Image (tube, rainbow, N blue to C red):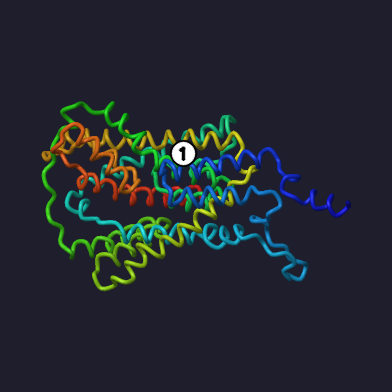
Amino acid sequence: MLEIKDLWITSGIAQLELGQLVMMIVALSLLFLAIRKRFEPLLLVPIGFGTLLVNIPGSGFEAVPVYDALGNLQTPGGLLYYIYSAGIATGLFPLIIFMGVGAMTDFSALLANPKTLLLGAAAQVGIFTTVMGAAALGDFGFLDFSIRDAASIGIIGGADGPTSIFVASRLSPDLLGAIAVAAYSYMALVPIIQPPIMRVLTNQDERQLVMDQLRYVSPTERVIFPLMLILLVALFLPQASPLIGMFCFGNLMRECGVVERLSDTTQNSLINIVTIFLGLGVGSKMSAEKFLNVETLGILVLGAFAFCVGTAAGVLMAKGMNFVCRQKINPLIGAAGVSAVPMAARVVNKVGLEENPKNILLMHAMGPNVSGVIGSAIAAGVLINIVGGV
């Protein structure tokens, strides 16, 4: 009888708390959205499953290793602890993801129409507006956000999951789970969130505007660009070099034409492996005590605000450029300034085709789309530089 009692006491059912049960439901909801609705499945499937694992009572998936006074290991840590410590706390996984994204990115559209770089820059307004808003909420006591937390939340507005994870792991590790879920959720909701904003801020004539065909970009230009980009960023903002550096390295492998095997591995096998562990590591930070609080709701609301402001700023910037530029820009492509590549560009193309079936905006939208990736990485460097020592 005593053995049966001990078995019951150590069972997960006996140790289960309400918060853990709620988080299991959250985990299953994430898996449902990823599998059934196809909302960013590559990340939400491992994040959802990692969330499920870390909330199983007594499983020890997130257990911290215990050492004696002499430094000898007494109790090993859990699997998710080691995944998080090795890949996310060090920044390794987000940087490798960025290298893979760089290897899959074609800068031709941006190089063919360089002024679209301004649209990607304008979309970062959502990041800094939200940082100030989150900091104000913390100062007035509405939510318990420090300036480091505010910076981590604001970066959600860049709609760039790896960048959000990189910044949060450096500035606010306890908020990592909520920030990662918000970032990838809003990336998945681009087709729902952006079109209403685009239609409200533009008229029919603007949405029907046909842009000129882009010029041909030579292989030499495509090779030189990542080298120039990393040198400029490294010289002016070294804190952004890790993200931009890996992004440019991946792109250089793609464009130089002499390391096809390395480029193919980076675009496929390597990024897929790291994505699995990145998702599990993020899930390890979604335990009940870290996720179920008022601050999480605030992060989700502020993240949505940041994304909407970034979308609106890109569209308004395009409208403003049409007052001074001789070659007109369809304002819709400004919405692609958020760096949800390539989904934001596809949404722009879809809205444009609905207004004018002959108006194909996909390649034009890729210019601000890839510049948004650069912009969000630079914004991350700025925020780490400003608040990292606070």
Question: Is residue 206 depicted above or below 44 in this figure?
Answer: above
Please tell me in which quadrant of the rendered image residue 138 appears.
top right
| Residue 82, position as x, y percentages in the image | 60, 62
| Residue 224, position as x, y percentages in the image | 23, 64
Identify the residue under disc 1.
131
Residue found at x 18% / y 64% = 219
| Label 1 crowd bin: few (<14), some (14–19), many (20+), radius 10 Å | many
Please tell me in which quadrant of the rendered image residue 326 appears.
top left
| Residue 361, position as x, y percentages in the image | 19, 42
Q: Nearer the viewer, residue 241 or 37?
A: 37
| Residue 67, position as x, y percentages in the image | 73, 65
Question: Is residue 196 depicted above or below 244 in this figure?
Answer: above
**In the image as oriented, which residue stretches furthest toward the right?**
2
**In the image as oriented, which residue stretches furthest toward the bottom?**
258
Side of 291 where 194 appears, left or right = left
Label 1: state its secondary structure: helix
Tell me the kind of residue under disc 1: Val
Side of 336 where 93 appears, left or right = right
Residue found at x 59% / y 33% = 294
Please tell me in which quadrant of the rendered image residue 226 appears.
bottom left
Q: How many marks?
A: 1
Q: Nearer the viewer, residue 133 or 24?
A: 24
